Amino acid sequence: MTNEEMNYIGNRIKSLRKERNFSQEEVAKQLDISRQAVTRWENGRALPSSGHVLKLAELFGVPVEGLTGDQPEAKPVPTWEQLKADIKAEIKRCIWALWALLLTLLFFASCWFSDTHLGWDVYVWHYVELYCYAWTSCFLVFLGGILQKKRFVASICTGCVLTVLVGQLIALYNRSHSPLKLNESWIALIIFWNLALVVGLFLEYRAKKKPWKIGTKVWMSCVVLLFALVSFGGFKTNYTYNRGSEDGYRAGYAAGLQDAKNGEDTRAEQEDEDCLEYREKYKVGTTMWGMSGYKGFFMHWYTGYEAGYKDGIK
């Protein structure tokens, strides 16, 4: 091969590498060679082997002729039999994704049927419906199947199962230990849904043969950060509201119990005193979550008072 041809191939490798924002180290890592070998190719001092040419063409997303400068041969027109064989092969390749989507749908359908028709209290199902978690998860499984992202699909499916199981355990624990019998299964929904999303994206990133471009990395990081911020806000708001609700119930219960023993109803004065005290505790006006906690306190103080007053009379 002449020097002109070697220089042409070297310049093409260098040009395509820069267009894809790859460094020489990244190309060398993908081909399992040294960076010096890539440098020699680009300087026209050496030629890549036929195997390396194929890997370079796949890495850069171009035909082999785009590297060597050879004229591509005319491709034969596929026959109807060949098209049918290709379609069957594509369906067979995607059959796992259809099974994953079907199993996900059946899992959520069984949760809905158990909660609605069998009378089993699937406490987490309330939040699954409220946040459209089932439809979102099925859409992600379908999208991952179309894009052939098996690790992402497996992560989302696992997250669905863990969300329901752990959420149910959290709800059972809270309802047995909370005076208001709060259903806090949303904790599992927020944690495991986001964890499944992040783990799935991370596994696909690690398994990707071609390095992601800087723009793709920035975009994916922004998506993950957005989900994290929204989830943290939802988690903090719900958590402070529930804690405020329990504080309000207990404070009202103590006031009602005391009034029942004294034989007088001073709920108006005591409610004002308790609400003022806890208003300072939750720092209402200085934090967005302070108002959420105070709202829960205010909403359930009267409920606690009524329960305490009735127990005191007994």
Image (cartoon, rainbow, N blue to C red):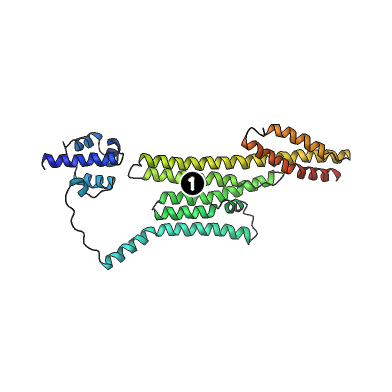
Along the line of sight, the residue nearer the viewer: 122 or 48: 48
Figure quadrant of residue 67: top left
Residue that extends furthest to the right in the rendered view of this protein:
263
The total number of labels drawn is: 1
Q: Position of residue 27 (x, y in %)?
A: 28, 39
Residue that extends furthest to the left in the rendered view of this protein:
2
Position of the N terminus, as image quadrant, is: top left
For the point 58% across and 57% down, which residue is it? 111
Is 84 on the left or on the right of 132, as rendered? left
For the point 80% across and 45% down, which residue is it? 306
Q: Residues within 10 Å of mark 1 (few under 14, many from 20)?
A: many
Figure quadrant of residue 60: top left
Figure quadrant of residue 269: top right
Q: Position of residue 196 (x, y in %)?
A: 49, 46
Tell me the kind of residue under disc 1.
Ala
Along the line of sight, the residue nearer the viewer: 88 or 174: 88
Residue that extends furthest to the bottom in the rendered view of this protein:
80
Q: Position of residue 202 (x, y in %)?
A: 42, 43
Q: Position of residue 176 (x, y in %)?
A: 69, 46
Q: Secondary structure at mark 1?
A: helix
For the point 57% across and 52% down, which residue is it? 128
Residue 65 higher or lower than 293, as above or below: below
Along the line of sight, the residue nearer the viewer: 80 or 206: 80
For the point 53% across and 49% down, which residue is it? 162
Q: Which residue is mark 1?
A: 196
Residue that extends furthest to the front in the rendered view of this protein:
285
